[in-house]
Image: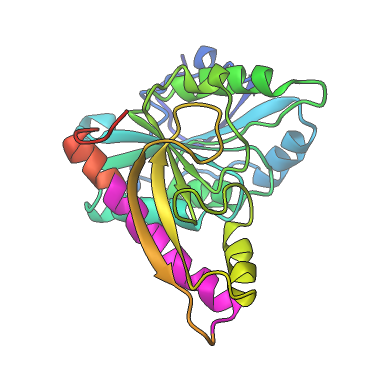
């Protein structure tokens, strides 16, 4: 356990065993605090170390836990740009979402979601998969790392890895995925592009977005929490469709998470 922090720390965690190196009750953000601007760590050095694939890298920041209300705790897994993560951060800051993002974990050092977490003063973790490591070994380590932050919900926003039961069994009915397609359509990667290509072939005139539980190793097949249709207009470009879907993604994700915080899984067939 580290001492109460007076400046930004970088903590290196071998094999994801972060619980031995810092106290998750301390490593939690307060984004609208008026405390002293921390001394920023050597982010370029941190990323350089992360590229080696040997360690998980964690930023930890000052905070005043006593002043924080009791909020639902979200750990966000991200592989890319993190626009939906940003929607969550904004909703938490505004009070629309009665929760807080307590950690952001990425499987790629280039994921801009790490930068969003860094700017929001949230613990940001790069967890690489080692070259000889199996998916299940990686997921077991990832689960131990996530458990350090004691999440109520684990949220996948642009997370590109299929999770195995070595991860999911630790968080039953608590892993939430956002997918830019309707149930039963376009599972997997590049769903918006594939929907647009189907539109050009005259096969569909709409796509959609869904938020669902991840309960097993299937691809986008867990119980649906919310879904919404997105029309494809005759003059749409792929860029136009992507923007329209993204707007629905962000709104639907916040609505679904708010409902989970207020009502739990009431009415969801799990």
- Which residue is found at the position 39% from the left and 47% from the top? 211
User: Do we see residue 120 in this rendering?
Assistant: yes
x, y (%) of residue 47?
70, 41
Please state which of residues 140 and 245 is positioned toward the viewer in this rendering: 245
The region drawn magenta spans 236-256
- Which residue is found at the position 52% from the left and 85% from the top? 234
Total number of numbered labels?
Answer: 0
User: Do we see residue 98 in this rendering?
Assistant: no
Q: Main secondary structure of the magenta part?
A: helix
Quarter of the figure with the C terminus: top left
x, y (%) of residue 250?
39, 59
Quarter assignment of residue 173: top left
| Residue 245 is a magenta residue | yes
Quarter assignment of residue 45: top right
| Residue 174 is a magenta residue | no
In the shown orientation, is residue 254 left or right of residue 249?
left
Up-down: is 43 above or below 69? Answer: below
x, y (%) of residue 88?
37, 51
- Which residue is found at the position 41% from the left and 51% from the top? 210
- Which residue is found at the position 52% from the left and 53% from the top? 185
Please state which of residues 50 and 249 is positioned toward the viewer in this rendering: 249
In the shown orientation, is residue 69 left or right of residue 58?
left
x, y (%) of residue 92?
30, 49
Residue ranking furthest to the bottom: 235
Q: How is the model colour-coded? A: rainbow
Please state which of residues 112 and 193 is positioned toward the viewer in this rendering: 193
């Amino acid at each position: 356990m580290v001492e109460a922090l007076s400046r930004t720390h970088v903590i290196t965690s071998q094999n994801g065993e972060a619980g031995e190196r810092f106290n998750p009750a301390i490593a939690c953000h307060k984004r609208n605090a008026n405390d002293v601007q921390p001394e920023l760590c050597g982010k370029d050095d941190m990323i350089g170390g992360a590229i080696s694939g040997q360690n998980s890298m964690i930023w930890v920041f000052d905070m005043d836990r006593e002043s924080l209300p009791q909020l639902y705790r979200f750990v966000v897994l991200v592989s890319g740009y993190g626009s939906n993560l940003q929607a969550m951060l904004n909703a938490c800051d505004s009070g629309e979402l009665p929760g807080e993002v307590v950690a952001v974990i990425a499987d790629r050092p280039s994921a801009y979601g790490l930068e969003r977490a860094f700017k929001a003063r949230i613990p940001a973790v790069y967890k690489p998969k080692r070259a000889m490591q199996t998916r299940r070994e990686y997921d077991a380590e990832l689960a131990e790392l996530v458990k350090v932050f004691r999440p109520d919900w684990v949220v996948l926003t642009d997370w590109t890895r299929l999770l195995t039961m070595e991860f999911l069994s630790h968080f039953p009915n608590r892993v939430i995925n956002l997918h830019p397609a309707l149930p039963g359509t376009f599972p997997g990667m590049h769903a918006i592009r594939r929907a647009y290509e189907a539109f050009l072939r005259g096969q569909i005139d709409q796509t959609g977005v869904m938020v669902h539980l991840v309960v097993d190793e299937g691809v986008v097949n867990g119980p649906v929490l919310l879904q919404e249709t997105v029309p494809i207009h005759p003059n749409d470009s792929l860029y136009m469709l992507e923007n329209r879907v993204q707007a629905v993604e962000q709104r639907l994700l916040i609505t679904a998470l708010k409902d989970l915080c207020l009502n739990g899984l009431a009415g969801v067939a799990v």
